[in-house]
Structure formats: structure tokens, C-alpha cells
Amino acid sequence: MSSTTTRLSRPTHLKPQTRPLLFPFSARQKSQSTALWKTVGELNAEDKKKQQAIKSSDPYSSDPERHPVLRINNLKPFNAEPPPEILSDSYITPSAFFFKRNHLPVPQVDPASYQLHVEGLPGGVLTLSLEDLKTRFPKHTVTATLQCAGNRRSEMNTVKLVKGLNWGIAAISNATWSGAKLRDVLQAAGYGPEVAQWARHVQFEGLDKDVTGTTYGASIPLNKAVTEEGDVLLAYEMNGQELPADHGFPVRVVVPGIVGARNVKWLGKIIISAEESSSHWQQNDYKGFSPGTDWDTVDFKSAPAIQELPIQSAITTPADGAVVDRSDEEVTVKGYAWSGGGREVVRVDVSLDGGKTWQVAQLRNSDKGQAPEPMPPPGRAWAWKLWEVTTPLPPEAQELEIICKAVDNSYNMQPDTVAPIWNLRGVLSNAWHRVKLCFCSRLTSTGQEM
Amino acid sequence: MSSTTTRLSRPTHLKPQTRPLLFPFSARQKSQSTALWKTVGELNAEDKKKQQAIKSSDPYSSDPERHPVLRINNLKPFNAEPPPEILSDSYITPSAFFFKRNHLPVPQVDPASYQLHVEGLPGGVLTLSLEDLKTRFPKHTVTATLQCAGNRRSEMNTVKLVKGLNWGIAAISNATWSGAKLRDVLQAAGYGPEVAQWARHVQFEGLDKDVTGTTYGASIPLNKAVTEEGDVLLAYEMNGQELPADHGFPVRVVVPGIVGARNVKWLGKIIISAEESSSHWQQNDYKGFSPGTDWDTVDFKSAPAIQELPIQSAITTPADGAVVDRSDEEVTVKGYAWSGGGREVVRVDVSLDGGKTWQVAQLRNSDKGQAPEPMPPPGRAWAWKLWEVTTPLPPEAQELEIICKAVDNSYNMQPDTVAPIWNLRGVLSNAWHRVKLCFCSRLTSTGQEM
């Protein structure tokens, strides 16, 4: 069998200008995003002046520059994901390509005057500077994958429209985070066994705020924050550099194994409490419902706030809609797999015949050519695994569907299909991932088949 | 709408005499089980004498009497499950009906001379009597569901034959267990931080043994055993009584949230170790593989030993194949739902149209008429929930399929179908559960439709 390379073209359904326009706000901002896609790095002097003129009234005017390869789902607030193939290129996602999920304008924080307030403990409020965080507490490093609850929401939209940004499969990325342990900071602030008698949650407030002054907020269960094994960081570094503005400069909380929405960026306040955060995002968003629940009947109190996410995997290459040369004898399929709660991915199955037969993919937890990361202790597998399988192409097919599904070490599996897990917010989309390939014949320069 | 009761007949596919005979050992022992089904409690004097005569050479001769309602999968060793409707009758499963899963003959243990040995700690071997266990350590009570990894294996057999006992949907039960905390016993035996530097597992050895003297054995991760939140018990009581012989008298380990096979009965030895148990059941059994893996290609080392089980649910009533009266306007559907690892079941969806639409069932965590059990702390929901939904019957249908699927608070879902999770050992069978009902017309005594 000859060694061949599958040549791929960008799948048309993911081109920015052809993505479905689902909601009025999407339609408006789509044109902005298309404009940005074309113009980043090439503004002329006149355009720059115009932009300056409107900047003063725009809370997003101080948002940072972003890499033009990102696929923008929403410009203000900025939400974007990398092209999927970038994800399987690199075990550690470069920060510039790491998906960006902002709920509000990026706040400009002066690191010299930054203060983090820790409240709700018997000793009163503890206030820490950035320097305090860096010098008073040991620095810990954790490699952890973050995933937006809305990752793969676009597949839910094919069943029935949902409310939310139309994420593809790349609202998930993996980075190395460094900072103080939240546990250490809480202990320094007076956390002890008597607090555990009544406290149940740790609330976080960001420094990002809307026009009414409401800040972004969320909470996690106290136990996750205070156990040695929780590995929750107050991170000030991402991939060995200070946090980028889009990822929470100067400090964000990184809660390994827990949905992105609880990993609050631009962290301003930590509150130990008996109750969950009362924020919109904790109480009335980021929850999963039955497919039969609609906006008229939904009772947000009836579902728990999403914390741990379920088993997930997707095919990053070939892309859906990619064209494969008929003369190729095999195809290399790559992707990512991850599970919430520190559950380790132990297997990825790949099928080329609609799920009748399955091959087991090779997993890796390192960048190519580098030594694998050491096996994490049980229950602390916070980072994804990348996977790959090379398999013969069926010789006669005109079209080919490739499916992947993953299994974690609690032997949880992905559901087969999207419709039965459809929910009004389009979160938790983790059915088997499917891509369709089309075959073409290789043509000579004179247009004849080779 | 009139209130009606659905009249159900025993589904034919679960009658002992009509269950498929899958393997030679099953075939041989099936006739024994059928015999037992008919004869328990009605042996005549002559039969009793015959049984006495062969008893001396039979290691199973001292096995206890069992309740005749149990559906026997294997007589020696004894493996049996209750009729499914018993499960949803009672939040706490009465011990006599609790599924029995024995790997070897039931050992006869004298409680007065019983000894439990704790090994592998720096201080040497700690030996405890039953009295020591009861008096030297606080008594803790935990309500926990145990499930056999092979529960619902019969559904896998409909895809392709697997090796193992042909369990229906009732190899799962819920009981209240009392005993010493394993954590307390390990600390008394010298467990401390320095042990955590090298130890990773806690091995258990039963007093049950095969003809070569090999005892049943298994292990769990050390962390589960030593954390305050693990709730692992050395149980000497089940549902307020001393442990029945079939459930490990005088002492078994109860590992909440973990597959039944690690809940070692007739506990003789506890060993702290760097390695997992070397037993057959830990190394070469109770592991999950890809549907493409067969007995020629299986590498048992490639999969982790099953510990936490995935999300599970099933319909206990109506039974598959039940006949429903056409004049009934609605049907009440009941079942159980449970998830491993202390993850709480938060929703059960029920569909009467093949999964196109879903209704949300009512959950309960108590016996009817009793106050609900208090909400467990996060991550410690060890017990199942029973669920129920009453729904209109489609008026025209000749046949009706009812489906259930559950969701836990990590938002893990059950897979849609059995074939893609099929595995050679037939474990971890947790696809949507489906029962088919047939409609009959209610006839008058003269044979006319009412």
C-alpha cells in the first residue's frame, strides 16, 4: 500500500461568510466578524482614524488584538475558536489559538494596582496584590483542558434552533497554567474545619462588567476548591507567559475538569458562601434540560448548574466536507478526546461504516516528538488526549462518513445521536462526532484522470 | 380520563425455562435452576435424603437457602436476580431479594473465631476480631446501590453472544449498610502520609475459595479508601440485620459508587499495596473493550479495571412483552436510575415514540409514604433513585415501545444503542432501556370485546 497524503480543502460549511445566520444579533455581528477577518493587520490610515473616533463610546474599544486565523462567532463580546486542525497539531494549544469565550468587554487591569479580595471567612476580608499572589504562595503548574459548555452547539442547531453562539467543534483547548493554589489562598484567608460546617460554595466575581455595572460571576462546590486533589489555581501564567488579556490578565481561576464558565477571568473577588453564585450564568444559564423542555416551560431551578462536563471527542481532521483523492488508499483521522471531573480518556473508537465496526485509535498526551506527560493520579486527568488512526479507504465509495466516540475510565460513553440530547440552550453537545468526506478523482493538467 | 390500571403478564422472554441457553455450562445449570425454581420449599422426604447423600462432596452444600422468587442465572456458584418489579416497589431492597452474585461457594465462617488481617503497613499486620470491628470503631451507616458489571448483559447477547451470566435488568439493588469505616481501620493499622508516598491500592481477599485454594480478590484505588468522602465500609450489617450469608457474613467491604465486583464479601484480608490485586477478576475480567475486540485479539492490560460505573437506568414495570388492555388510556412506567462515582441522577427521560419526544419522570429517593432521604453531599450520591411517569397510551397502536434514559449531575447520558458498546465480556451494558408492550382487547365472559 503506497503512503499517500489526503489533500483537504476547507469545508464550505465552516467558512465565515457561509455559516448559517441564526439570530438577529448574529447576522449583524457576522458582517463585523467577516470584516475583521479580512482587515486585521491591514487597516489603512483613514480607517484607523475612523476607528479611533468611535472608540471612546465603545466599551469593547480596549479589547486586545486577536489572531486572524480565529473563526469569530461574536465580535462584541469577543468569541472565537481556532480552525479544528490546529487543535490536533499541538498537545498544548498556543495561547493565541486557544478558544476565546468572553461574556463582556475585556477589562483593562493595571497589574500594579490589582487587588484580589477574599471574603466570607471568619477573619474578615483578605486583600492580595498580584505580587502577594506570586510571592506568598507556592507556584503550581497544571496542564488542563478548558471547554465551553456550548462546544459543538452548531450540531444541535441542525436538529432545531437553540439560543447561543454557533460554536463548531473547537470551543475547547489545552494549556499549561501556573499560579497559586486556591486552597492555599483560602487557608491563608482563614479557611478551616469550622467553615466547612456551613460553607458549600466558592463564588468568583470577574472585573468585567456590563453597562449596568453587573460583573460576570460563577461558583464551584467548596469541596473542589479545598481538597488537595482539586488542583484549582489562581493562575497568573498561561503556557509559561503572563496571562493574555483575553484569558483573564492578570489573574483567572482555573478549575480543572469543570466547565469553562466557572473558570472566571479577570478575577476580582472570591466569596466563601453557603449558596451558589446568584449570577445569571449560574442560575439561569449553563444548565441542561430534556429535549422536551422549551422556553415556555423551562424551570431553571429544576436542573443543576453545569460543573463537571461529560465525555467528549471530535474529529479535527479531515474536516467535515473535505474532498479526498480517489487514488488515496488510506486516510489519517485525528482528533481530541476529554472528559470532565478528572476522568481519564481510556479509548477512542473510530468507525468508517456508520458505527457497524470500530477501530481503536492511538492516544497521546504529549506534543509529537516529546516524551508523554507523566500519568496523572487517579481522578486528576485534567488534560485531553489527542488521538490518531490511519485506516484504508473503502475503494468504491462516493462518500464516506467517519465517526468517533470516546470512553473515560468510569466507562462513560458518548451518546450516539444529537436529537435526544438536544436542549434549549444547546449546551453539552457530545454525541458521536461525524464528518463526511467526498471523493474526487485526481486530474492531470490537461484535465484527464490520472 | 378514567383512572385505569395496566394489567401485566409475565414477559415470556424472562421465564427461566425459555431463556436462551448460551453456553454449555449455562445449559447444564439451567436445568438445575429450573428444578430449583419449581421445588424450593416443596422437597419430599426422599429428595431430601438424596440431597444429603451428595452433600459431603459438594463445596456448595453449605450454601444458604434462597427466596424462591429469585430468578436464577447460575446455581453453583449461586447467581440470581429478583423480578424487576420488586426493585421499583421498594427504595431499600429487602435483603432476601437483593441480587446475589457469588463467584465461589459461600464459606461458612464462625463469627466467634473470625479474623480480619490488615497487611502492608509499616506497623506490621493488624488482626481484628468481629467484636473488635464492632466495638473499637464508630459504626457508620451508608445507603448504597450495588450493581454487577454484567447487569443487562442479556441485551448484549441479542447483538452477538458474550461470555458471562445472562443477567436481565435486576443485577442491581439498594441497601443500607452499617459497619466500621475502612479509613478508620487503616488509620488504626498505621496508615499515614508516609504510606501515601508509595501505596496506590487497597487489595481485598475473600474467605471464599476454589478447589485449588485460590480466594476471590479485588482492589480499589487507595484514595477512595482513605478520603473522608469515600464512605467505604467494612460492613457487618445489611438493612439493620447482621449480613446474610449470601452477602458476605460476617464482614464485607462496601465501596459506594464502585462496581459490585470490588465489594468483596466474606472479607479475610486487606492489603495496602503499590499494585492492583493480581487476581483474575482484577486483571483479566471486569474490563471494557471496543466492539471490535474479540477473544483472539484482546489484551487485558490495555483497559483499566472497572471501578466507577457509568450512568444507568431501566424500566422495571411494565415488563418487556407485557400485554396492555386496549381500553386503558394511560400507562404508569416505573424504573430505577443510578450512576457510579457518587454522581447523582438528576433526570430521567421517557419516550413512547422511539426517542422522538421525551417526558421527564418524577424521581424519588425514599420508600413511598416516607420522607425523602436527605440530599447527599456533592459527589456522595451512592444510592439510586426510583422514578415513575404516567402517560397517555397512543389510542391506535398495536404495539408500543417505551424507552428510558437517565442523566447524572456530570451530565453523562446513556448511549442510545447496544451494538456500539458491545464488548466480549458483556459488561457495562447501559444503553437506553426499551420495553415493548402488546395491546389486547378486554373481552367479556362470552368472548366479546367490551
Image (spheres, coloured by chain):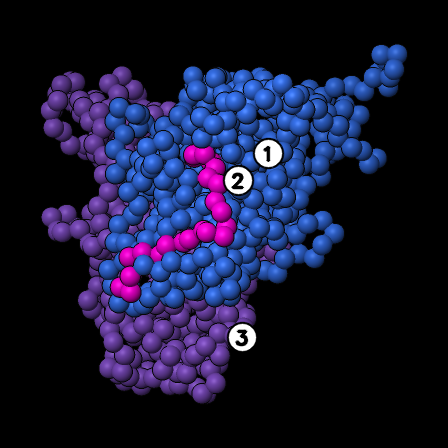
Chain colours: A blue, B purple
Q: Residue at x 29, y 74 (%)?
A: B180
Residue B102 placement (x, y as % from top left): 39, 63
Mark 3 or mark 2, whichever is nearer to me: 2
Q: Quadrant of residue B392?
A: top left
Q: Residue at x 45, y 57 (%)?
A: A129
Q: Pointer 3 and pointer 1: residues touching (CB < 8 Å)?
A: no
Residue A431 placement (x, y as % from top left): 49, 34
Residue B198: assigned label: 3
The C terminus of chain B - image quarter = top left
- Up-down relation of residue A183 to residue A343 (above or below): below
- Up-down relation of residue A234 to residue A189 (above or below): above
Cα–Cα gap, marks 3 and 1: 46 Å
Cα–Cα gap, marks 3 and 2: 41 Å
Mark 3: secondary structure = loop
Instruction: Give the residue type that dot 2 points to.
Output: Asp
Residue A246: assigned label: 2
Discs 3, 1: same chain: no
Of all chains, the one bearing label 1 is A
Cα–Cα gap, marks 1 and 2: 9 Å
Q: Residue at x 30, y 28 (%)?
A: A293
Q: Quadrant of residue A163?
A: top left
Q: Which residue is mark 1?
A: A66
Mark 3 or mark 1, whichever is nearer to me: 1
Residue A308 placement (x, y as % from top left): 42, 47
Classify residue B443 as left or right of residue B71: left
